[in-house]
Image (tube, rainbow, N blue to C red):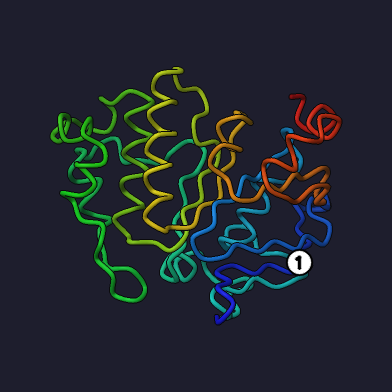
Amino acid sequence: MSDGTLIEARGIHAYYGASHVLHGIDFVVRRGETIGLMGRNGMGKTTLLKSILGLLPPRAGSVRVRGIDLTRAAPFRVARAGIAYVPEGRGIFPNLSVKENLVMAARPGHDGRTEWTLDRAFDTFPRLRERINHGGQQLSGGEQQMLTIARVLLTNPDLLILDEATEGLAPLVAQEIWRILHQIRETGISSIIVDKNFSAVSAISDRNIILVKGQVVFEGDSDTLRAQPETLRAHLGV
């Protein structure tokens, strides 16, 4: 789209059974933009991501990728449109080696780009090169998270979505993940990052969105958010 909009979700209402989780959310991601998606547990962050990805089709509202209506499209169509997902829980294949996990996912981007190759992934994640023949089940939690991020980068995406980017990782490993995410940001890939580490998310994000009970209660840059301590305390416990 001419204005650089990559994802445009409008009026999203989502349910789990009879439970109304998202209440008319508008959510936009532009090319090259990093979004910090924030809020306490149970406020709708993962539900919003699943609505965008086609994993939980919204009951009302629309999702467009580069202007193409993908509302309630199958998840594989959203993935082929250049949207890559690192889920909470990672989802690597434990019976495949590091190399096999990466090679099976590798493909050109939706526009034919092949900037992310196996060699580039190993240059970005040298620890994975050291463990190239290890099985997925032999990796630490941090190494598994690196493998999951490297795997989606090999799809040459336009947008990287990370749900709980450093959940449960040791501080030094988490620090390495944040360093890599800064590197990825410099390549121009858009990102949506969910993580409980406010300072780390706000240090990388261009814009932050806070959800409370399925509604947007704040949207703005990190400086604006830091200048509102009452908002941080009320909605993030920071």
Going by the image, does 180 lie left or right of 202?
Answer: left
Q: Position of residue 175 (x, y in %)?
A: 43, 26
* Residue depicted at x 40% and y 51%: 186
Q: Position of residue 20 (x, y in %)?
A: 83, 53
Along the line of sight, which residue is nearer the eye, 189 or 216?
189
Going by the image, does 60 lie left or right of 171?
Answer: right
* Residue depicted at x 76% and y 66%: 59
Sort mark 1 into few (<14), some (14-19) or many (20+) by Cα contacts within 10 Å: some
Amino acid on which the number 1 mark rests in the picture: Arg
Q: Position of residue 202 (x, y in %)?
A: 61, 38
* Residue depicted at x 79% and y 67%: 11
Q: Is 220 situated above or below 228?
A: below
Along the line of sight, which residue is nearer the eye, 72 or 117?
117
Q: Which residue is mark 1?
A: 59
Going by the image, does 108 lie left or right of 184?
Answer: left
Number of numbered markers: 1
Please identify the quadrant where the C terminus is shown.
top right
Please identify the quadrant where the N terminus is shown.
bottom right
* Residue depicted at x 72% and y 33%: 41
Q: Is 23 situated above or below 235?
A: below
State which quadrant residue 181 falls in: top left
State which quadrant residue 197 falls in: top right
Along the line of sight, which residue is nearer the eye, 103 or 192?
192
Secondary structure under badge 1? Answer: loop
Q: Position of residue 56 (x, y in %)?
A: 64, 58
State which quadrant residue 104 falls in: bottom left
